[in-house]
Amino acid sequence: MLTVAKRPCGSCPYRKDVPSGIWAREEYEKLPLYDGPTWEQTFAVFMCHQRDGNLCAGWLACHGPWELLALRVARLRNEVDPAVMSYATDVPVFASGACAHAHGVRDLKKKTPRAIKMLRGLWKKRNDPKKAR
């Protein structure tokens, strides 16, 4: 059963305080797919980049659980914890996937020192055998 963390991860592409260019372009390209009317959206749920088996908390905060077609379908299939449908957070996120996308891709070619530091931390976390998934 899919669930969600209490807060978006520290490197979530939807968070306003995350440096640009942390994730691959392909990941940022997924974000606007959830901006349209519910009936036009993709059926794919957006999973967390850091917590296996969790929905992306930033995705839920940005779009709202009841506006997401993928989440509504997954809920009908009993694949999602019912508590997810009332998700809320105080973490500032972008107003849309398009805004998060624009921010995320802005510095892909020339990363800031803050982005490089965060990327090193992510790489270390992902490659630490003690934290193997």
Image (cartoon, grey):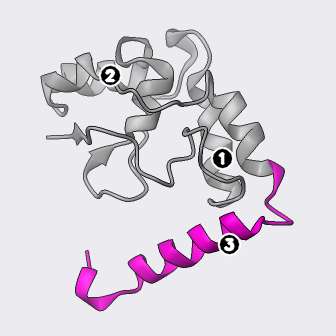
Question: Bounds of the magenta span?
Answer: 106-133
The mark lying in front, picked from 1 and 2, is: 2
Kindly report which numbered mark, 3 or 1, lies closer to the viewer in this rendering.
Answer: 3
Whether residues under marks 1 and 2 lie with C-beta atoms below 8 angstroms apart, the answer is: no
Residue 80 got which mark? Answer: none
Q: Residue at x 51, y 28 (%)?
A: 42
Q: Position of residue 98 (x, y in %)?
A: 70, 29
How far, Cα to Cα, is label 1 from label 2? Answer: 22 Å
Badge 3 vs badge 2, beta-carbon distance below 8 Å: no
Quarter-of-image position of residue 22: bottom right
Residue wearing tag 1: 28
Neighbor class of circle 3 (other Cα within 10 Å; few <14, some 14-19, many 20+) is: some
Q: Secondary structure at mark 2?
A: loop
Q: Is residue 45 visible?
A: no
Could you tell me what secondary structure mostly forms the magenta stretch? Answer: helix
Q: Which residue is mark 2?
A: 88
Number of marks drawn: 3
The answer to whether one can see residue 96 in this image is yes
**Residue highlighted by disc 3:** 116
